[in-house]
Image: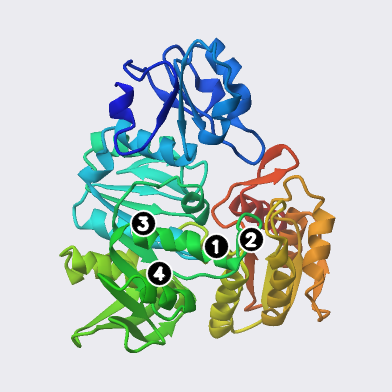
């Protein structure tokens, strides 16, 4: 592909050479550069691609793309074409789209953003549309899927180049609908720049990622970008920030909620049980739909609502939607793992790692509890420190007993992370157990009849990140091992 076609729709300047050349492939990874490639210099948090220009030229890069501010620093004797742009991240996004032939436009693309609920919503949508006979793709936190093929997900939303490569694979497999988690990082770093979504879904906005975003306002602005580039907007009108989006984006909006009875779709008659939820949805025309839902909790009703709206809007029958909700399973989202054991208590795993997520889980469990609620919880290292004391306060306020432990400490000292959590606690119903294995073991060994044990923070994850190592740590296997010791 020639440079002019590659950059179609994006302004660029030629600093050295000319753009009348054919290129091999595009990359922003120095390890992947080969003869005839275009290399994009991306300035990140740990590395700056502009510092590796000599290296990639030695490996055969034919074109180097730099930020405009580096133009004056480029030697005039480089044996390659040098192109400058105002933003190499945006340029990489557009060039990736063009390189793969704008294949995401060949199927319908549904983007879901929000602090909590993205993963569950994509899985509900996948279940409904597969049952309706459609070929589907999923891009998100747990895994990426192309129809039944599972692909490991490195991050919630891939980089622009990897994303369009996935779109290309989906097109080859004749995908008709793609359901995609769109993280605030992806929006802030322009990974989805230049992509028009058929539907944009807003779930909620609560505290998270303030290690990345400057402040909450910046976090909200990142989320807002999705709806500036979505044809239909499905918005949670019970959420304060959802209403701000509605005020800013006033066309093609469909609202949903539980509290706001003026929403286009309202859930009511919500009945919670320990293994399912029943509820009724009433649309703005007065039509009612009743569902028997395989996920637990009022907050999970919020995840079902946009899925129901999109399915109905795409002409899927109420029967298919009802059967899909009845059988839906999402790993690590209030997953009752005790069902396979003959236990006198319930053990739930949940990915809840934000204050709001943890509060939603514990509030739900309190409504169905017949005995104590015991919570095992920690916080990840190298992430938003401000939420740590909030996690501690919520856990001890809504639980009868709490084991404060490690999550993914990463480069931080686990004890210092736990100290931050404990700063938010003004009760005495907790103990610190640094080893996550030991904390889970204590919660199970010390259980009482009818207890509910919530192991929060990791959910679907089967690993722990300790310093520079990733160790295998699947909480389902941990529970198996602990219970076998009792046999």
**Proximity of marks 1 and 3: CB atoms separated by less than 8 Å:** no
Dot 1: element: helix
Check disc 3 and report the residue beneath it.
111
Residue drawn at point x = 57 percent, y = 80 percent: 363
Residue plotted at (59% across, 37% down): 43
Please state which of residues 300 and 64 is positioned toward the viewer in this rendering: 64
Between the C-alphas of marks 4 and 3, the distance is: 14 Å
- Secondary structure state at the residue bearing disc 2: loop
User: Relative to residue 84, is residue 379 depicted above or below?
Assistant: below
Q: Which of marks 4 and 1 is nearer the N terminus?
A: 1
- Marks 4 and 1 sit apart, C-alpha to C-alpha, by 21 Å
- Tell me the quadrant of the picture where the N terminus can be found: top left
Residue beneath the point at 81% across and 81% down: 427
Q: Are marks 2 and 1 in contact (CB under 8 Å)?
A: yes
Left or right of 458, for residue 243: left
Give the image location of residue 42, x and y in percent.
Answer: 54, 34
Residue placed most toward the observer, 338 or 49? 49
- On the question of residue 276 being in view, the answer is no
Looking at the rendered structure, which numbered label has been put on residue 219?
1
Disc 2 designates what residue?
210
Query: Can you identify the residue that label 4 sits on?
Result: 303
Measured from the top left, where is residue 289 in percent x and y? Answer: 24, 80
Q: Say which element carries label 4.
A: helix
């Amino acid at each position: 592909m020639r440079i002019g076609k590659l950059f179609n729709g994006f302004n660029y300047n030629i600093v050295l050479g000319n753009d009348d050349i054919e290129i091999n492939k595009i990359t922003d990874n120095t390890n992947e550069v080969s003869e005839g490639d275009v290399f994009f210099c991306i300035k990140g948090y740990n590395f700056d691609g502009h510092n590796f220009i000599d290296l990639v030229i030695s490996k055969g890069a034919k074109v180097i793309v730099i930020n405009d501010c580096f133009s004056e620093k480029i030697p005039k004797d480089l044996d390659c074409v040098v192109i400058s742009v105002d933003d190499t991240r945006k340029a990489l996004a557009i060039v990736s789209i063009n390189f793969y032939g704008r294949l995401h436009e060949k199927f319908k693309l549904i983007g879901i953003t929000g602090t909590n609920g993205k993963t569950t919503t994509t899985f509900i949508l996948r279940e409904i549309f597969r049952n309706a006979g459609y070929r589907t793709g999923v891009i998100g936190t747990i895994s990426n899927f192309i129809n039944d093929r599972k692909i490991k997900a490195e991050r919630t939303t891939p980089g622009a180049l990897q994303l369009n490569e996935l779109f290309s694979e989906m097109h080859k497999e004749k995908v008709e609908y793609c359901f995609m988690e769109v993280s605030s990082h992806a929006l802030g770093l322009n990974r989805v720049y230049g992509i028009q979504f058929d539907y944009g879904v807003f779930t909620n906005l609560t505290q998270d990622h303030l290690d990345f975003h400057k402040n909450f306002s910046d976090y909200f602005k990142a989320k807002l970008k999705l709806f500036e580039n979505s044809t239909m907007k499905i918005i949670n009108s019970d959420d304060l920030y959802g209403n701000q989006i509605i005020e800013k984006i006033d066309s093609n909006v469909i609202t949903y909620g539980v509290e706001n009875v003026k929403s286009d779709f309202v859930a009511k008659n919500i009945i919670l049980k320990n293994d399912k939820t029943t509820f009724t949805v009433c649309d703005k025309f007065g039509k009612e739909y009743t569902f028997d839902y395989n996920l637990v909790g009022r907050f999970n009703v919020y995840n079902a609502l946009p899925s129901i709206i999109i399915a109905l809007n795409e002409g899927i029958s109420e029967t298919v939607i009802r059967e899909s909700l009845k059988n839906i399973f999402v790993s690590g989202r209030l997953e009752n793992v005790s069902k396979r054991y003959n236990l006198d208590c319930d053990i739930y795993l949940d990915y809840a790692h934000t204050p709001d997520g943890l509060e939603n889980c514990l509030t739900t469990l309190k409504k169905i509890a017949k005995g104590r609620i015991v919570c095992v919880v920690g916080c990840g290292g190298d992430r938003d420190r401000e939420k740590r004391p909030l996690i501690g306060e919520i856990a001890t306020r809504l639980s009868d007993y709490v084991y404060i432990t490690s999550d993914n400490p990463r480069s931080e000292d686990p004890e210092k992370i736990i100290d931050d959590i404990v700063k938010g606690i003004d009760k005495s119903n907790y103990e610190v157990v640094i080893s996550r294995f030991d904390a889970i073991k204590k919660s199970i060994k010390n259980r009482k009849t009818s207890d509910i044990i919530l192991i929060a923070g990791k959910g679907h994850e089967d690993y722990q990140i300790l310093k520079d190592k990733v160790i295998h740590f699947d909480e389902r296997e941990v529970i198996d091992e602990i219970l076998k010791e009792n046999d």
